[in-house]
Image: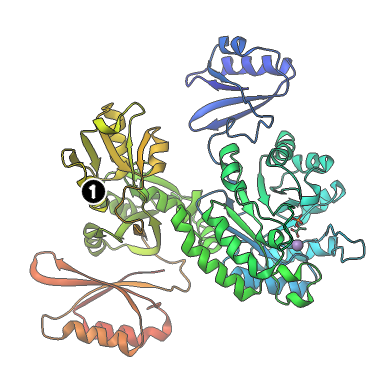
Amino acid sequence: MILVLEKRITQIQKDKIKNMLSDEGCIIREIVDAGRNIIGIIGNCKKSENELRQCEGVADVMPIKTSYKLVSRDFKSEDSKVQIGNVVVGGDRIVIIAGPCAVESPDQAMTIAREVKKYGAVLFRGGAYKPRSSPYSFQGLEEEGLKILADVRKETGLGVVTEITSPAQADLMMKYVDVVQIGARNMQNFELLKCVGQMDKPVVLKRGLASTIQEWLMSAEYIMAGGNSDVILCERGIRTFEPYTRNTLDLSAIPVLKKLTHLPIVIDPSHATGIREKVSPMARAAVAAGADALMIEVHNNPDQALSDGPQSLYPEQFGQLTRDIYVIAPVVGKQLDFDYLRKSRMINNLDRDSSKTAAFIGEYGAYSHKASLGYFGDEIKPVPVQSFKEIFNAVQSGKTQYGVIPLENSLSGSIHENFDLLQEYDLKIIGEITIRIKHALIAHENADKKAIKKILAPPPAFSQCRNYLDQYPDIQLVPVTATSSAVRHVKDSGDISAAAIGSTMAARIFNMKILEESIEDNPRNYTRFAIIAKESKYIENANKTSIVFSTDNKPGALFEIMKIFSKYKINLVKLESRPMPGKPWEYMFYADLETDLEDEVMLPVMEELKEKSETFKILGRY
Ligand code: PEP
Ligand code: MN
């Protein structure tokens, strides 16, 4: 049963409810979900739904119909995020866990860890206690293996994941690793589930070889009922009649689970397929289907691996896979961040008095909000402001540490105002992120699509949805500053004949109805955002440099600059001209270069650029 508490409930009223439930022998859990204070009642509650409804301070009472309770979406509607050191599973960033099936030696583990880290893994996996089908197979290095994992963490900064096969190993696990894994064969080992339920460590719970999703969720319930809510579900293939793969990867489990539970999902295509060449296709499909994380077996010498060599990727193959995932993730609203660990370290090392905030335009649910979450995760708090200038001012004055500004859209082009502001302010671009823009038409719950008379959106959103809007020439288009502001205006106006163009995230945040999804003209609708800050001191080696320059007003002046890029084989990925303020028909040029211009070896390039340009400024390197 779920009790939704009234917003203005007093502490005395709340304590009274809690004491009454405890006296009845109920187990209770308090959470905040979608802005509501909730008490979940698990176990047998003698009070009827009606009796509970009568309690002072209770706004609503809802039964949880499923046999699993704490893991159910009914209990918690928002996605759960599991924090592992600096890494969050279940957020906007895809988490890549990789490593060998078993830890075999310090050298083997360290070599593979360095490789997988280089290619984007943020957690390292390796078994120290191996549950093998044959008692004669390699059983793992046991405590020695755990020590090696702890060394890997120390050396590489990667959190480490390993399997626990018996409650007797709990203390060692607490000492050496960051995440414990319950293997497929132990999914219904209830003593082990109770044990990890009491541990203060995140748990990866693999699906049993022949377990239903219901049984799997009941096992997760054991862990959560024990007090540990950091549970990640891992689909690793189930037994079917099909012999061409080791198991059958049940990818449909992803959307099924997303509906039933708030817990994050990791997909293990290695044990699912058992065959190296089948791993990457299934990993790509898993991300497309909505997986939060991947767990991939990688070995530097698979032929000699002591377990699961045939399904282990070579490090380079793993690198190719993560590049593909990098491209696929934004299509489904996620990111693969090759800079994840360095960025998190940087954020955690910020001075204590740093604001740890990022200004963005609009309201929560804006694409800029999503860009902030995709770039920083939850570590930096996004702060909504009302104009681009306000973002620049906030960063300049130190009110916020960072700013998130859209620079260009693949359909509607550059956001010129931000290029001009970059020129005006002395701030640095420290990073960039590209987000897929998938617009929805959003209105009130009781709105009727046919009765919509006006649509609110910022001008670029109108132009991205041109074809759709052209079908309704009688609808009035009202420009506002951001999509999320449009959603808020419509919400606040109470006008059921008004709609907004915005993200599904905004619709969810403002509790509004989606009248139509994907109304943008072209599905390849992406916006590139820049992250701005006062300085860029934490950037070690950058791949890209953004510059702004002007040239003399004489023939071939721009060509002279281009010649420098050509001479040093520097790839130009953007060139944009903007009028110079107060100088009609004179232009500044913005360029993005695929190089780190501040690298020492680039000194001659810098000198030539400065010589051939009239003004020259580095906007940032990232
Ligand atoms: C493993 O992850 O190495 C493992 C043994 O997996 P599973 O429990 O899925 O077979
Ligand atoms: Mn394995």
Asked whether, in this view, residue 192 is left or right of residue 225, the answer is right
**Residue at 26%, 62% in the rendered image:** 422
On the image, the x and y values in percent for residue 30 come to 61, 28
Circle 1 sits in a helix, a strand or a loop, which is it? helix
Note whether residue 94 is visible: no
Q: Nearer the viewer, residue 464 or 11?
A: 464
Q: Residue at the location (78% across, 61% down)?
A: 127
Residue 131 occupies which quadrant of the picture? bottom right
* Badge count: 1
The local crowd at label 1, few if under 14, some if 14 to 19, many if 20 or more residues have their Cα within 10 Å, is many
Q: How is the image coloured?
A: rainbow
Whether residue 455 sits left or right of residue 182 in the image: it is: left
Vertical order, 432 against 40 (above or below):
below
Q: Quadrant of the N terminus?
A: top right
Q: Is residue 567 above or below residue 347?
A: below
Say whether residue 86 is left or right of residue 198: left
Query: Splitting the image into four quadrants, where does ligand 2 fall?
Result: bottom right
Q: Which residue type carries mark 1?
A: Phe
Which one is nearer the viewer's eye here, 447 or 245?
245
**Closest to the observer, 205 or 211:** 211
- Measuring from the top left, give residue 322's x and y in whole percent: 55, 66
Seen as rendered, the residue at the extreme bottom is 567
Q: Which residue is mark 1?
A: 462
The answer to whether any part of residue 330 appears in the image is yes
Identify the residue at horizontal 30%, vertical 61% (top origin): 410
Q: Nearer the viewer, residue 1 or 439?
A: 439
Vertical arrangement, residue 534 with respect to residue 262, above or below = below
* Quadrant of the snapshot with the C terminus: bottom left
